[in-house]
Amino acid sequence: MKYAFFPGCSLESTARPFDLSTRAVCRALGIALEEIPDWACCGSTPAHASSDSLAVALPAFNLRKAQDAGLPVMVACASCYARLRTANHRIGREPEDRRRAERVTGRPYDGGVEVRHVLDVLVNRLGADRIRSKVVRPLAGWKVACYYGCLLTRPPEVVAFDDPEHPACIDVLAEAAGAETVDWPFRTECCGASLSMTHPEVVGRLVHRLLGMAQEAGANLVAVACPLCQVNLDLRQAEAAKAHGPLRPMPVLYITQLLGLALGLSPEALGIDPRTVGPGMPPPDLAAGAIGAGGGNR
């Protein structure tokens, strides 16, 4: 099983732990990743908001490179995944979008490269049973609120690898890792990440509401698969508590980090920094000398 990997800009900066843990977990599970050579930013939200031509052409530029390599594409960032899938969707259906992308990139692309999210590959291609068979340190005692956010499974006509309103892929992987998942109602609610700079007061309210509900449901950790959600829910906890009431610090980790721990990988290999995880990390034997042992820095 081999994929052309598109890391995107976030995984080389604020979401470096997502990059490390995705690559490490794929290696451990026998999934080969070949990074797309000389890839460019997919445009994400800026191109989407300012130039419709670039919003399609930038993903097409990267997908054409994968096509040259003869490989399907795997993406981890929810925003990059949405942009690459959207470009394929439009180029495959609208001749004018295809011509505009070709004019911008200077190369033809027909929208035919398969694009899959890492969760899609792990759950629907590899399968929970196979992953479970590789677990060496089950996360017994970990109670996880699986948070999908508003983008990962929407719009369904473009992404379509999980139920858009009641997704389950993160829950499947957390349970395969031996953790217990909690039932909570805000798993696809927006955390307000795109308003972080313009309306931080709104974001603080949303973060407090989400984490408060996760704690009320009995979770002691939140698992995510979006770089923006992770940063937003992790770094804004103290600010949200100050503005809206007490909030127990809660670790917010990528699902690939949880899965990697269960597969026996070290916290360092997965980009888990005990200084930023927070004191609420579940304390099973995994924590000894690793995560949670040093408490948080909030």
Image: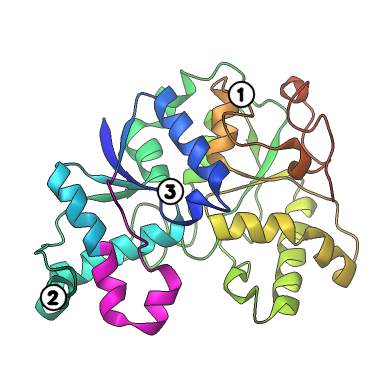
Give the residue type at disc 1: Ser
Which comes sooner in the sequence, label 2 or label 3?
A: 3
Which comes sooner in the sequence, label 2 or label 1?
A: 2
Q: Are marks 2 and 1 in contact (CB under 8 Å)?
A: no
Q: Secondary structure at mark 2?
A: helix
According to the picture, the residue beneath numbered tag 2 turns out to be: 103
Residue 266: numbered disc = 1
According to the picture, the residue beneath numbered tag 3 turns out to be: 76
> Percent position (x, y) of residue 84?
30, 61
Give the residue type at disc 2: Arg
Front one among 166 and 283 = 283
Which comes sooner in the sequence, label 1 or label 3?
A: 3
Q: Write the residue at 65% across / 81% down.
A: 198
Separation (CA) of disc 2 from disc 3: 28 Å
> Percent position (x, y) of residue 262?
58, 25
Look at the image and give the residue range highlighted in magenta. 36-59
Q: Are marks 1 and 3 in contact (CB under 8 Å)?
A: no
Q: Write the residue at 57% across / 42% down.
A: 17
Q: How is the image coloured?
A: rainbow
Separation (CA) of disc 2 from disc 1: 47 Å
> Percent position (x, y) of residue 4?
27, 42
Q: Secondary structure at mark 1?
A: loop
